[in-house]
Image (cartoon, rainbow, N blue to C red):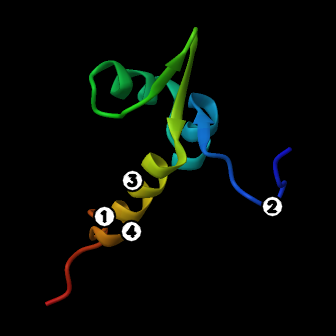
């Protein structure tokens, strides 16, 4: 049995897309182009929580392209 207070180890493409605020098709394309690692179990693709956290941590460290740099 799993603890409901912990986050999952893997996300479906739809769940990951929601977390990343992108289209599921964007993730499918990234997986197909080997830009995003995923695990296939029969017909289902799963993305590890570690991968999602690395992506979000990396984007938090990168400057926002929409914000002009201050001198």
Residue linked to disc 2: 5
Which quadrant of the structure image shows residue 54?
Answer: bottom left
Q: CA distance from mark 3 to mark 4?
A: 9 Å
Q: Residue at x 55, y 38 (%)?
A: 17
Residue assigned mark 4: 60
Q: Are marks 1 and 3 in contact (CB under 8 Å)?
A: no
Quadrant of the rendering where the N terminus is positioned? top right
Q: Residue at x 40, y 64 (%)?
A: 57
Mark 3, secondary structure of its residue: helix
**How many neighbours does mark 4 have within 10 angstroms: few (below 14), some (14-19), or many (20 or more)?**
few
Please name the residue that numbered disc 3 is placed on.
Answer: 55
Which quadrant of the rendered structure holds the C terminus? bottom left
Tell me the crowding category of disc 2: few under 14, some 14 to 19, or many 20 or more residues within 10 angstroms, Cα based: few
Return the residue at label 1.
Answer: 66
Reading the chain from its start, which is encountered first: label 2 or label 1? 2
Q: Nearer the viewer, residue 66 or 23?
A: 23
Q: Whole-Å distance between the Cαs marked 2 and 3?
A: 22 Å
Residue 35 falls in which quadrant of the image? top left
Q: Which circle, 3 or 4, is nearer the viewer?
A: 3
Residue 67 left/right relative to 15: left
Q: Which is more foreground, mark 1 or mark 4?
A: 4
Where's residue 29, x and y in %? 37, 22
Instruction: Decide which of tag 2 and tag 4 comes sooner along the chain.
Output: 2
């Amino acid at each position: 049995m799993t603890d409901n207070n912990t986050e999952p180890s893997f996300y479906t493409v739809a769940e990951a897309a929601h977390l990343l605020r992108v289209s599921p098709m964007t993730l499918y394309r990234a997986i197909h182009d080997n830009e995003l690692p995923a695990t296939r179990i029969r017909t289902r693709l799963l993305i590890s929580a570690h991968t999602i956290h690395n992506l979000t941590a990396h984007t938090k460290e990168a400057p926002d392209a929409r914000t002009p740099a201050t001198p």
